[in-house]
């Protein structure tokens, strides 16, 4: 019989402790212990509790085929980055090029030839030539990996956000060569504000935080025998590296976007262009693909 606050927690923990699946039991017991502890620690009021449940409902209601408010909130609280770092880099003990998936990956990105352009509609911007070099933890090249790449336009919009861009603009799927390399041409991306018209936007406003993510290029590499590598390579010169609202920037994923003012060796008409060359480390493990945040 429940007679006081402590009895509530004991009763719930007793039920959670009878969960048959060991991992689910571990998670639910810890969740209840921490959640009840949080309620006690902040002395949560009834009005605050009702507000919290309303906010959770609003997060779900704000999620659509092209927007995932829950992913956005997880990033804004640092949960996405924490989960990533704890599960990679030898369980958080070493640096890792694993990073956030973000809310804009599509599972149907178009196959592209080595060195091809992923600019599929008129997209003014500085030419950017990218080389991603895939290796295992010992530095051995990882060949024949499928690698999805995608990024925002120089105006800070992904193609699914911008009716002016062609379908799959600034997206492509490549296969790493014998040296573990993937090459493609694109335009230099810009940083952009995360959506602020929902719960996350209200949180940032209440905390006096800006919404601007630093410029980055996404990559997702898949090959059986390796844990799927999901990463974002950030422009080391972006002014918002230290204040990323999604807490995604780590030292291992700072990329050198090098400015060139001489003729490009393969495109002599270009005398003002950028290059990005970054090594991505794939850890041994089970290969699996994430669920696309958008369709």
Image (tube, helix red, strand yellow):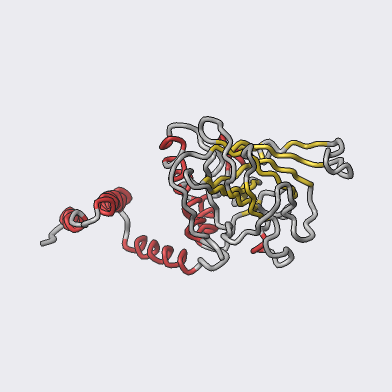
Does residue 155 appear left or right of residue 133 in this picture?
A: right
Residue 56 placement (x, y as % from top left): 42, 63
Give the residue at the far left of this rendering: 1
Does residue 230 appear left or right of residue 119 in this picture?
A: left
Tell me which residue sits at (46%, 36%) in the image. Answer: 89
Give the residue at the far top of this rendering: 138
Image quadrant in which the N terminus is located: bottom left
Tell me which residue sits at (74%, 65%) in the image. Answer: 164
Q: How many marks?
A: 0
Query: Who is closer to the viewer here, 63 or 253?
Result: 253
Query: Who is closer to the viewer here, 141 or 246?
Result: 141
Residue 199 placement (x, y as % from top left): 50, 61
Image quadrant in which the C terminus is located: bottom right
The answer to whether residue 294 shows anywhere in this view is yes
Does residue 194 appear left or right of residue 130 in this picture?
A: left
Tell me which residue sits at (74%, 39%) in the image. Answer: 275
Residue 119 placement (x, y as % from top left): 74, 55
Query: Who is closer to the viewer here, 208 or 235?
Result: 235
The answer to whether residue 239 shows anywhere in this view is no
Residue 166, placed above or below residue 177: below
Residue 230 placement (x, y as % from top left): 54, 47
Tell me which residue sits at (27%, 49%) in the image. Answer: 30
């Amino acid at each position: 019989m429940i007679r006081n606050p402590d009895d509530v927690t004991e009763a719930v923990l007793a039920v959670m402790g009878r969960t048959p699946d060991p991992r689910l039991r571990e998670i639910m017991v810890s969740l209840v212990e921490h959640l009840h502890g949080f309620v006690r620690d902040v002395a949560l009021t009834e009005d605050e509790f009702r507000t919290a449940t309303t906010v959770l409902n609003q997060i779900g209601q704000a999620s659509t085929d092209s927007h995932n408010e829950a992913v956005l909130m997880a990033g804004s609280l640092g949960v996405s980055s924490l989960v990533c770092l704890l599960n990679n880099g030898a369980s958080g003990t070493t640096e890792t090029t694993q990073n956030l998936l973000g809310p804009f990956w599509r599972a149907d990105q178009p196959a592209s030839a080595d060195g091809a352009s992923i600019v599929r509609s008129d997209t003014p911007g500085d030419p950017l030539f990218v080389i991603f070099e895939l290796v295992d933890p010992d530095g051995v090249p990882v060949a024949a990996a499928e690698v999805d790449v995608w990024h925002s336009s120089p105006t800070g919009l992904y193609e699914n956000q911008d009716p002016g861009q062609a379908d799959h603009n600034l997206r492509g799927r490549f296969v790493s060569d014998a040296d573990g390399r993937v090459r493609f041409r694109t335009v230099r991306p810009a940083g952009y504000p995360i959506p602020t018209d929902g719960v996350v936007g209200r949180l940032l406003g209440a905390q006096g935080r800006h919404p601007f993510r630093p410029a980055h290029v996404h990559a997702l590499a898949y090959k059986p025998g390796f844990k799927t590598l999901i990463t974002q390579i950030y422009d080391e010169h972006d002014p918002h590296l230290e204040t990323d609202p999604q807490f995604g920037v780590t030292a291992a994923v700072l990329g050198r976007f090098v400015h060139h003012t001489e003729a490009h060796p393969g495109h002599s008409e270009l005398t003002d262009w950028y290059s990005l060359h970054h090594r991505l480390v794939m850890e041994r493990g089970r290969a699996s693909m994430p669920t696309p945040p958008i369709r």
